[in-house]
Image: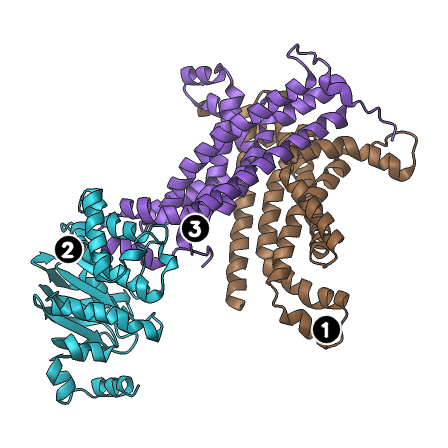
Chain colours: A purple, B brown, C cyan
Amino acid sequence: MNYNWNWHIFLEPNPMGTGTYLDMLLAGLVLTIKTALLAWVLALIFGSVIGVLRTLPSRTAYWIGFCWVEFFRNMPLLVQLFLWFFVLPELLPRGAGLWLKQLPNAPYWTAAIGIGFFMSARVAVQLQAGIGSLPRGQKNAATALGLTTVQSYRYILLPMAFRIILPPLTSEFLNTIKNTAVAITIGLIELTGQARSMQEFSFQVFEAFTAATVLYLLVNFIVVTGMRFLERYVAIPGYISGK
Amino acid sequence: MLGSFDFDVIRRALPYLFLEGMRFTLTLTALAAFGGLVFGTLIALMRLSGYKWLGRIAGVYVDFMRSLPLVLVIFWFYFLVPYIGQWLTGASRPITVGAFASSLITFIMFEAAYFSEIMRAGIQSISKGQPAAASALGLTYAQSMRYIVLPQAFRNMLPVLLTQTIVLFQDTSLVYVLSIPDFLGAASKVAQRDGRLVEMYLFAAVVYFTISCVASFFVRRLQARIAIVR
Amino acid sequence: MIEIKHVNKWYSPSFQVLKDCTTSVTKGEVVVVCGPSGSGKSTLIKCVNALEPFQGGEIILDGVKVNDPKTDLPKLRSRVGMVFQHFELFPHLRIVDNLCLAQEKVLGRKHDEAQAKGMKLLERVGLKEHARKFPAELSGGQQQRVAIARALAMDPIAMLFDEPTSALDPEMISEVLDVMVDLAREGMTMMVVTHEMGFANKVADRVIFMDRGEIVEDAKKTDFFGGTPRSDRAQKFLSKILQH
């Protein structure tokens, strides 16, 4: 392979004047994490509401949940980001559209909201399955004690359902982090974006992508380890999940 | 606003969008799904082979691929494939690889990781009695896999495999980052040329949505049918 | 206390689970409901606290009409205790918290008060030392005793038991029945769906026999066991059960 390796490139100053190339990548990593966290919070909030709606006896609630999930699940994330970023400002009244377009950090907010809603459909499906896997008698027992529907969900069903779906939620969180890379298309210079600019400036393509890869693996490892601790922390003595 | 919505832009672009863009997208999806399934099954067999090192290599590959964003993997292969080609052919310079070939290799390698997990679950869901019965009849390991276990695993997992293929269909839109005219890339080209972003992106969204919805509807029907048969 | 009048229930237009069921339970009375599986006995008892909706007739609980849309159902349910076949303790809460939750959230009791009440009831069912454990760490019989204590913690005016011993291993049945016998002797109003005829013989005032959604027999215990039950169906059922 006639490729000129240069692993010292990371310590050389980047052309943006923001320190070394390594600093550039780390700034990208921080943006990846920030975007992913905000998106994940949105995904959890909306996903929980929609997931619960899909388990209520009301047909209207079920249909709202169904439409939400189908809408966000049947379009590529990239297309959804384009809709949020390019199309939504044009469809709004002039003033609001203009304000949106001139928003500072627009790619960041768009990415977080777009990815958050995209992931909320997946969280909703997981939560619906989690609630569905609980014995029917649990809801009955809560109801028989006089708990209202809201109280039954708040104190009985959701604490159990979230424990059960913790492992799939971990992979959905990892997906959220990975999906932030799609936002490179609307100008978010996160980790993959920074690796790409480093490659364009320095021509050291494989060093740049290797570094990004290592950082993604590291984040993955930290999340998986953290979630394993969380799982152990919320585990119920004597209770074998999946039973 | 909708008053100035220009349907004619879409109409004029239709031949380009579908004959070029959608053909690229669908061909890429179909070939990548097929290749991903073949390699994915091989990886799954490696993981379940009982040979420690074979299993470990397969496991590392799957975990590695699943840890990375698809966009990064697309970039990786886009730059790496010419060098691998050079190494394989012994050429003196990195070979030029077409956009389609590069994307196809990327998606096969990437999807193999995901398909392998599905096939692994499928193989593990077959009761231990099946391969035992096959061995009792005198079938070799390879024969029992080929004629007994894999067909059942494939049939049980068909809905999941198809759902993953719908995800793959949506994911192929990411070749956009290489400026390749797949369906979305074609729509984007027209959008920028004519300054009609709203029309083109909305239209692209509707097309992806319709195809995915119809496809998942059929997968659900298939799933219900399989559930009854069992 | 509990009045059930002409209750009809359909699962689908062609499948009627309850056919014109009429009976009542007066204060302090213990009524055992028995019958073959699928006879509608569990459904009937679940109608009493409106866990199951029904389409015809009415149920009046301590003067309150259950199937009136204006009835505050959570409040009504909090006044009737219910014990389930599969215990239905809340697996993520400690035993004592299983007893406290509804006291605090429904009755608005202070945590200390709820806890004191809970501990007293756990002592009564002989499980005080298990208060800090989680449900899955207890045996089935222990869990069902906790479930009874959980229902009692709400100071119910009546208790409903839905096959409380049918999910238990045989050696655990008596520890649960003992608690129920004590409860009956203290004058608790009880409606019990069970196949335990020994229990019925010991403490029941009346026995109701159901089959195919109908109340076939509704007799004083002495008549039900002592005299000959009037229907063939009840007789057949009894002879099958009493063989063991």
Residue carrying label 1 = B135
Q: Quadrant of residue B197?
A: top right
Q: Secondary structure at mark 3?
A: helix
Q: Write down the chain letter for disc 1.
A: B
Dot 1: within a 10 Å radius of its alpha carbon, few (fewer than 14), some, or many (20 or more) residues? some
Above or below, comparing residue A228 to residue C59 in the picture: above
* Contact, mark 1 vs mark 3 (Cβ under 8 Å): no
Dot 3: within a 10 Å radius of its alpha carbon, few (fewer than 14), some, or many (20 or more) residues? many
Give amino acid for label 1: Ser
Location of the N terminus of chain C by quadrant is: bottom left
Q: Is residue C14 left or right of residue C66?
A: right
Above or below, comparing residue C174 to residue A87 in the picture: below
* Contact, mark 2 vs mark 3 (Cβ under 8 Å): no
Taking depth in this image into account, of A34 and C68 the one nearest to the observer is A34
Q: Write down the chain letter for disc 3.
A: A
Q: Check chain identity for marks 2 and 1: say if they share one.
A: no
Above or below, comparing residue C170 to residue C151 in the picture: below
